Image (cartoon, rainbow, N blue to C red):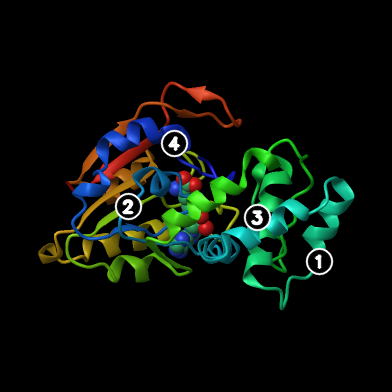
Amino acid sequence: MKLLRYPGGKSKLLSFLVNHLPKSKDIKGSYIEPFVGGGSVFFHVNPNRALISDLNPDLITLYKGIKLYPHKVWETFKLFPKGKAAYYSIRDNDTEGRPMYYKAARTLYLNRTCFKGMWRHNNSGNFNVGYGGEERRWAITHENLIEISTIFRKAEINNCDFEDVILGTSKNDFIFLDPPYKPGDKDLHELHYSNGKFLFDEQIRLAETLKSLPKSKHIHWAMTNSSHKDILKLYEGYKIEKIPFGTGDKLGIQTKSSNEVLITNY
Ligand SMILES: C[S@@+](CC[C@H](N)C(=O)[O-])C[C@H]1O[C@@H](n2cnc3c(N)ncnc32)[C@H](O)[C@@H]1O
């Protein structure tokens, strides 16, 4: 089940990834995902105890809203009128002071009716993606939201930087990391992610944070990243596997090589 359309979503790589990740029952501590995004891997693993986090505040309000108020989110979502004019009015209306379930329903509605599920904000922080249509809106049902809410109830959901999440881990936790990146050699040093800047300095900070985890914590981690040589250099000495298939530059196009790697410390 896919709740959101999300940039960098891993649903197309799931069949490869799941063979390299522990099963929920084998994770002795908590499942931790500091760049949870659309959450495809988290939903698939469906862990018994988890901490998921992301720097995107609207995304996290959506997840908390579904966790706490799935029925209210659904009732609000389904009553948003259809069509282009309604979309722009809902998109451009201020949500200040609105309850969490309203904000959650609005984010879900915008994600499901905006152009290609893009997630882009202008300099004032306002969502500015154009209207895309209603076809994808009803792929989500009331039952889906209840099911997702049940999965979220087993998780703590935070809106913070990856470093706080990684350093806050406990003994025997498992961390899955999917930081923002562009596959392959392109644009590694450019600003390339719609939600915040994740430049190469951030990649260095991430590698250093992971390397600083004490061995005594017995933390296993797995990360998807670009196969760019500068990334591979950061993780020399770790197990690095090429991910065989991926999506091309255009949505839905499969390529032979994904130009992505899976890096693990186990
Ligand atoms: C590639 S996406 C994750 C995609 C996700 N695995 C999925 O399947 O949908 C990367 C996420 O990292 C988040 N992010 C960017 N910078 C961050 C930071 N410093 N700390 C935590 N999350 C961050 C972005 O908001 C984005 O949701």
Q: Which residue is mark 4?
A: 184
Residue drawn at 39 percent across, 60 percent down: 34
Crowd class of label 4 (few under 14; some 14 to 19; many from 20; radius 10 Å): some
Residue drawn at 72 percent across, 64 percent down: 126
Q: Which of label 2 and label 4 is nearer to you? A: 2
Q: Which mark is residue 47?
A: 2
Name above or below for residue 35 compared with residue 212.
above
Q: Which of label 3 and label 4 is nearer to you? A: 3
Instruction: Work out whether mark 4 precedes mark 1 in sequence or the reverse, and give the earlier one.
Output: 1
Marks 4 and 1, how far apart at CA: 39 Å
Q: Return the residue found at the far right.
A: 85
Can you tell me whether the CB of the residue at mark 3 lies under 8 Å from the nearest atom of ligand 1? no
Instruction: Work out whether mark 3 precedes mark 1 in sequence or the reverse, and give the earlier one.
Output: 3
Q: Return the residue found at the far left.
A: 216
Marks 1 and 2, how far apart at CA: 37 Å
> Would you say 154 lies left or right of 71 here?
left
Marks 3 and 4, how far apart at CA: 39 Å
56 or 113, which is in the foreground? 113
Instruction: Work out whether mark 3 precedes mark 4 in sequence or the reverse, and give the earlier one.
Output: 3
- Quick check: can you spot residue 75? yes
Crowd class of label 2 (few under 14; some 14 to 19; many from 20; radius 10 Å): many
Q: Which residue is mark 1?
A: 93
